[in-house]
Amino acid sequence: MLLSLSQVSKSYGSVKVTDDLSLALAPGEALGIIGPNGAGKTTLFNLIGGNVRPDAGTLAFAGRDITGLDAAARCRGGIGRSYQIPHPFAGMTVFENVLVGATFGAGHGEKAGRPVAVRALGQTGLLAKANRLAGSLPLLDRKRLELARALATEPTLLLLDEIAGGLTEHEVRELIDCIQDIRAEGIALIWIEHIVHALLAVVDRIAVINVGRLLTTGEPAQVMASPEVRAVYMGLPQ
C-alpha cells in the first residue's frame, strides 16, 4: 500500500471528528471521498497531510510510519495538497507561485526548481500565463494554479480538497481533463468533492465518511447506489 491509516481518531474537546478510521490507498490509485458537511473529510486531509496529529492510531506512507512527521516533512516525502479556496501570492507571477512549491515544498534550490515549476505549469495548462500576476487570474486558472503548486512539490500522492467547487459545468469538464492527465502519470489521488459526477469520471473507488467514521468504500457506481449512502449523503429514504 502507498498510504494506510489504522484506527485513527481525532477529537477537539468533546467532539470526535475522526473516529477509529482505517483506510488504505494503493500506488497510482484514485480514491474519492464523499460525506455530508461536518463528516470529518477535511480533518482527514489534515491528518494525512500532517497539519494535525491524531490522538490515536497510526499513518504509514510508502512503507514508513509518518504519524509523528510534520506537514513539511510529509510534503517533501511525497504528499502534495491543494486547498478548497485558492490563496495564491497575488502580487507574484504564476511562475513565481509555482516556484515556491518547487523550492519550499520539494526542497529544490531556485535553479533546480525552475524546470520543475515549468513542468507543473505545462501539466496544468498554465505555461502561457506564467508571467501573469496570480491575483489577476479567473477562478478556473486559480484552481489550476493550486494544482500546479502542489505538483511542483513532486508528489507521489496528491490530495485534492473540493477543487471543482464554484466552477461552471464547462470549467468542471476542463478540470476533469487536467486531473485525468495527472492520473495518467501514475500519481495517486485522494479527492474530496461534492460534485459527484466529477469524481465518477476520475476515481477508481469511493469512500463515504459520516460523523468521522468510514461508512463504506468500494466501486463508485455500487457505492452511490447503496441505500445507506443515499440516506446519509443525499438525505433520501432507504
Image (spheres, helix red, strand yellow):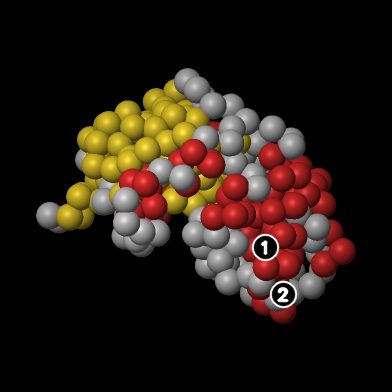
- In the rendered image, the vertical position of residue 197 relative to residue 213, given as above or below: below
- In the rendered image, the vertical position of residue 164 relative to residue 55, given as above or below: below
Residue 94 placement: quadrant: bottom right
Total numbered badges shown on the rendered structure: 2
Three-letter amino acid code at the position of disc 1: Val
Left or right of 155 on screen, residue 73: left
Q: Which mark is residue 8?
A: none
| Relative image position of residue 95 (x, y in whole percent) | 76, 61
Determine whether the residue tagged by mark 1 lies in a helix, strand or loop.
helix
Residue found at the far bottom of this picture: 136
Three-letter amino acid code at the position of disc 2: Leu
- In the rendered image, the vertical position of residue 64 relative to residue 215, given as above or below: above
Residue labelled with disc 1? 172
Left or right of 90 on screen, residue 184: right
Residue found at the far left of this picture: 14
Residue labelled with disc 2? 137
- In the rendered image, the vertical position of residue 138 relative to residue 94, given as above or below: below
Q: Which residue occupies 51% across, 62% down?
A: 84
Q: Is residue 104 visible?
A: no
| Relative image position of residue 34 (x, y in whole percent) | 44, 51
Mark 2 vs mark 1: in front: 1
Q: Is residue 128 visible?
A: yes
Q: Which residue occupies 58% across, 71% down?
A: 166
| Relative image position of residue 219 (x, y in whole percent) | 52, 35
- 100, 147: nearer the viewer: 147
